[in-house]
């Protein structure tokens, strides 16, 4: 009996000690790349830090900088926050199998990190020149998920798109989330400066590739699966120097809304995300002029560009089965301007 009591007391001590350690961990803030706390760990007595959106991340003026297309996130200054340190999952996509194009950097990287931390297995596509960025993402996915699959290749080629889908399905052991996120944006002051090759590359990347990918994915998608497209505020308010890009983003809105209706009987939801100005390699590798880059995001009501991680929870939400009433929708995050 006495021994049992001793055991009870010592167990209580151990549990109390553990409790103190856990409590300390729960109150420790989590820091972003910029060193600001963004998200605490939910738990009793551990309120999340409350931070105003205007002061959360860097604002202009930014240093002028340019990289050869397609650019590397690791070379940007300041470095974008893709959620490496700040995104915490809560099992919302447990067991899901996702393919994300452009998953090496920017918005796609943020979605890839978030999906893995929500319990999904994730395959990413990117260009071979982006291997260094992709390696970092694969390591972050593997740290949280059973599978992180790297599938480099150029989406402007139909045969590659077919192979990408086949490899993703084989590697993941199925597929239930497809994120068409890769995109090409090259600013040109005049239509006269856009060559046919330029125009063709933008159309192939932003419009043909999602068409080829959706076609190849459909035979594998069961009821409950989701397709997500990345459109843009450019779909609603095109910039003068983004003639070709802006029209692909308007088309993206429609390639989301049409199949949402068509695929309703199959139980496949199709939605889009419309970001505003987001601090990514797309902008520093020809997407924006140096003049625009220095003031980037300053014309939004929040007075700064968004960071990729600020879109991650939208991609999670649209993929999660508790968003079952959302199809044919476009969710925006544009710092207070733009539509929808
Ligand atoms: P990003 O440069 O980090 O990502 C774009 C990715 O597209 C690249 O990483 C690259 O892997 C991929 N890509 C481009 N051409 C390709 C090709 N031919 N084959 C294979 N992959 C290719 O930039 P981001 O801003 O994160 O872009 C992601 C999406 O967000 C794009 O569709 C873009 O149009 C859209 N978007 C961006 C912004 C913004 O301000 N950054 C705003 C609205 C919409
Ligand atoms: Mg990239």
Image (cartoon, rainbow, N blue to C red):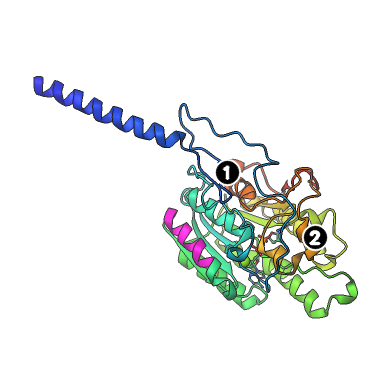
Q: Residues within 10 Å of mark 2 (few under 14, many from 20)?
A: some
Q: Are marks 1 and 2 in contact (CB under 8 Å)?
A: no
Some atom of ligand 1 lies within 8 Å of the CB belonging to the residue at label 1: no
- Identify whether 238 is placed above or below 93: below
Residues drawn in magenta = 134-145
Q: Is residue 142 magenta?
A: yes
Q: Is residue 57 left or right of residue 141?
A: right
User: Which one is earlier in the sequence, the residue at label 1 or at label 2?
Assistant: 1
Percent across and percent down for residue 189 are 87, 69
Residue 71 found in image quarter: bottom right
Residue drawn at x 44%, y 60% as measured from the top left: 147
Percent across and percent down for residue 287 are 75, 66
Percent across and percent down for residue 69 are 68, 73
Residue at disc 2, secondary structure: helix
- Main SS, magenta residues: helix
Residue drawn at x 56%, y 74% as measured from the top left: 163
| Quadrant of the displayed image that contains ligand 2 | bottom right
- Quadrant including the N terminus: top left
Some atom of ligand 1 lies within 8 Å of the CB belonging to the residue at label 2: no
Q: Which residue was labeled with disc 1?
A: 36
- Identify whether 65 is placed above or below 14: below
Residue drawn at x 62%, y 56% as measured from the top left: 80
Is residue 181 something one can see in this rendering? yes
Q: Is residue 47 magenta?
A: no
272, 226: nearer the viewer: 272
Percent across and percent down for residue 191 are 89, 72
Q: Which residue was labeled with disc 2?
A: 292
For the residues labelled 1 and 2, the Cα–Cα distance comes to: 26 Å
Q: Is residue 206 left or right of residue 24?
A: right
């Amino acid at each position: 009996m006495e021994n049992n009591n001793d055991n009870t007391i010592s167990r209580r001590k151990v549990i109390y000690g553990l409790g103190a350690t856990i409590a300390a961990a729960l109150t420790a803030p989590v820091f972003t790349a910029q060193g600001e706390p963004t998200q605490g760990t939910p738990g009793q007595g551990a309120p999340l830090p409350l931070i105003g959106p205007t002061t959360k991340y860097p604002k202009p003026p930014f240093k002028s900088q340019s990289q050869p297309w397609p650019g590397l996130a690791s070379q940007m200054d300041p470095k974008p926050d893709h959620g490496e340190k700040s995104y915490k999952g809560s099992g919302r996509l447990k067991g899901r199998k996702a393919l994300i194009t452009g998953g090496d950097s920017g918005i796609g990287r943020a979605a890839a990190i978030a999906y893995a931390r929500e319990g999904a297995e994730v395959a990413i596509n990117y260009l071979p020149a982006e291997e260094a960025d992709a390696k970092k993402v694969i390591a972050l996915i593997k740290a949280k998920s059973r599978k992180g699959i790297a599938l480099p290749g150029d989406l402007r080629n139909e045969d590659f798109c077919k192979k990408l889908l086949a490899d993703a399905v084989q590697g993941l052991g199925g597929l239930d989330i497809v994120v068409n996120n890769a995109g090409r944006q090259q600013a040109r002051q005049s239509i006269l400066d856009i060559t046919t090759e330029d125009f063709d590359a933008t159309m192939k990347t932003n419009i043909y590739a999602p068409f080829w990918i959706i076609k190849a994915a459909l035979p594998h998608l069961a009821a409950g699966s989701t397709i997500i497209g990345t459109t843009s505020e450019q779909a609603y308010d095109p910039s003068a120097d983004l003639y070709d890009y802006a029209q692909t983003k308007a088309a993206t809105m429609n390639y989301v809304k049409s199949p949402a209706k068509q695929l309703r009987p199959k139980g496949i939801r199709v939605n889009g995300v419309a970001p505003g100005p987001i601090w990514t390699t797309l902008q520093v590798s020809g997407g924006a002029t140096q003049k625009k880059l220095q003031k980037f995001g300053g014309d939004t009501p929040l007075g700064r560009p968004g960071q990729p991680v600020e879109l991650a929870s939208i991609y999670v939400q649209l993929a999660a089965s508790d968003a079952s009433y959302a199809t044919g929708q476009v969710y925006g995050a544009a710092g207070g301007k733009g539509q929808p």
